[in-house]
Image (cartoon, rainbow, N blue to C red):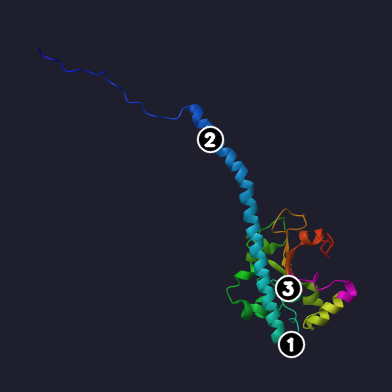
Amino acid sequence: MTLLPRRFPATRSRTSAFTLVELLVVIGIIALLISILLPTITTVRRSAIRTTCAAQLRDIGNAFQMYLNESKGRIPEQVNPLPLESPTLFVGKPTLFDAFDRYLGKSRKVWGCPGDHYVEPDPNPTLVGHDRYVDAYGVSYEYNFYMNVLSPGRPFVQVLKDAQIAFGITPTRFRIFNDLTHFHGPVGRNGNMNFLFADWHVADLEGLVSAGTVNPSGK
């Protein structure tokens, strides 16, 4: 008796694949995760930018203190606070770079806030063709007008005493440098500018307002 080979039914290979419903579910989950994580990522990024800006202001504060040590306590004579521009009031004057380059190095990176951007229309023709204030002016920070124009070259201690007598401003509230405008948040909202104060700490206006240290107008 001859045995015939046993035949098995042919099997068809089945290729695994997402159905349309499964694909839509995956896309929906990904979109949900992005919507949850994006605000957090944005907040962390803004916080990092503000922290870097504050660190740069501290570096400028250290340079200012070194200048005071070498000048026997006197603040700089009047300087052009916008080195790449020549405002009429400061034509022919040395610039902030001239005063502080030797203490900060000549890369001048410290003068540019990483959050620097135009946050509102500015009619100044100098800004045309630029995306950041630092590109137009050379700096992202404003030097105290009272010190630069009304009290140049005077002893720093005396400037602070006069400010306290005349305006009631203590060193913890007397600003030496600050962001040119609200780089760290919406225009018009207090708390979105960093300030270097005369006791050498750096803080933002919102924190000071909530602590009752300075009024909302920033004065």
Q: Is 94 positioned to the left or the right of 169 in the image?
A: left
Element type at mark 3: loop
Under mark 3, the amino acid is: Trp
List the residue tagged with mark 3: 200
Q: Is residue 209 visible?
A: yes
Q: Residues within 10 Å of mark 1 (few under 14, many from 20)?
A: few
The earlier-in-sequence mark between 2 and 3 is 2
Element type at mark 1: loop
- Measuring 53% from the left and 35% from the top, which residue is drawn there? 27
- Measuring 67% from the left and 76% from the top, which residue is drawn there? 62
**Marks 3 and 2: in contact by CB < 8 Å?**
no
Disc 1 from disc 2: Cα separation: 67 Å
Q: Which residues are magenta?
A: 164-177
List the residue tagged with mark 2: 27
Question: x, y (%) of residue 196?
Answer: 73, 69
Question: x, y (%) of residue 209?
Answer: 81, 60
Q: Residue 63, located in which quarter of the rendered image?
A: bottom right
Q: Residue 164, located in which quarter of the rendered image?
A: bottom right
Q: Residue 162, located in which quarter of the rendered image?
A: bottom right
Which of the image's four quarters has the N terminus? top left
Q: Which mark is residue 72?
A: 1
Which of the image's four quarters has the C terminus? bottom right
Number of marks drawn: 3
